[in-house]
Amino acid sequence: MDSFAALTALDWHIELGADEAIGDTPINRYEQAVKPAKGPIPKTGPTSNIKPIDVMPVIPQVEEAAEDIARILASRCNDLETLRNTIATFEQCSLKKGARNLVFSDGNPAARIMIIGEAPGRDEDQIGKPFVGRAGQLLDKMFAAIDLDRKAEGDAALYITNVMPWRPPQNRDPSDEEIAMMLPFLERHIAIANPDIIVPMGNIACKAILGKTGITRIRGHWTEAFGKPTLPMFHPAGVLRDPLKKRDCWADLLALKARLNT
C-alpha cells in the first residue's frame, strides 16, 4: 500500500468515527479485578449465623424516565447559557459518551429565523458548532442569496442549532428514543430564542418538531411548530448529493424572504 492509499484508508476510518488505534490482543474494559479485603474478617459468631449481604438490584434507566428528567431540567432553564450548561451535564443520552464536543448553536440568538438541523457530523463534532462542514458552507451560500448570515445583526441575522447536540457514531441517524429524549431541550431552546420563523432542514428535524417525514413531499409548505410559522427545507447535505434539488431550495428561500418582508 502506497502512502496515498494509506492516507485514504485512514481518512475513511476517521470518517466512520474511529478515534484510537488498537492492539492485536483485545482488552475487556468491563472486567474488574476483585480485590481482597484488607485485614482479618471479624467473627461475630458461628458461620451458620452469617447471613449473605442483601444486594440492591440495579434498575436500568428506561428512556421514558430519561425524557422526563430532560423535561424537568429544561423547564428550569431561563436563558441560553443555563440551557447549554444543563445539556452539557445531561448524562442520560449515550451519544454524549462517544462525542468529542457538545454542539449547541451558532449565529445570533436574536435572529428572526431559527434553522434546525439534524445532528452534528465529524467537522461539527470537532469544532463544536453546527453546520461548519461542506453542508454548512452550502447553507451559508444559500441564505446569503437572500441576504441572511449567521454573523449578521438585526433582520439579516440567522440562528442555527440541531435536534441532537452530540454526534451519533458513524454519522447514523439518531433513534426515535434519542430524539424524544432530547426534544424537551430543543423545545425550551426555541422558547428562549423566540424566533419569528423556524426552518427545519431534513427528515430528522421535521420528524422531531413536526412528527412528519418525507421531506420531498412536505418541503416548501408552510406549517406550524411550537406556535411558530415553520417552513421545512431540504438539508444542504441532500442538496450536495442531488444538485437537482437546488431549484426547490431556491423557491423555498424566496418564499422565506417574502414571509420576512411581510
Image (tube, grey):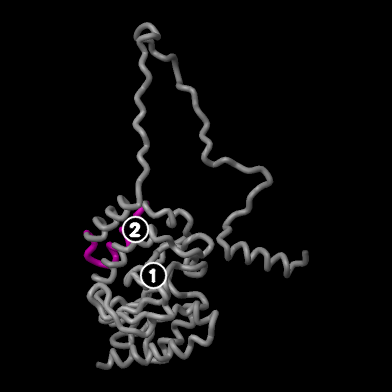
In the image, residue 104 sits, relative to residue 76, either above or below, namely: below
Residue 136: % across, % down:
47, 78
Q: Can you see residue 161?
A: no
Residue at 26% over, 58% down: 71
Classify residue 24 as left or right of residue 203.
Answer: right
Residue 175: % across, % down:
42, 60
Q: Name the residue under label 1.
A: 162
Residue 181, which numbered label? Answer: 2
Residues packed near mark 1 inside 10 Å, few (<14), some (14 to 19) or many (20 plus)? many
Nearer to us: label 1 or label 2? 2
Identify which residue, 214 or 42, lies in the foreground: 214
Q: Can you see residue 15?
A: yes
Question: Three-letter amino acid code at disc 1?
Answer: Asn
In the rendered structure, which disc, 1 or 2, sits on the residue that comes first in sequence? 1
Q: Quadrant where the C terminus lies?
A: bottom left
Residue 240: % across, % down:
53, 81
Furthest toward the right, the residue is 1
Magenta stretch: residue 86 in it? yes
Residue at 74% over, 67% down: 3
| Magenta extent | 76-91
The total of numbered circles placed on residues is: 2
Dot 2 falls on a residue whose secondary structure is helix
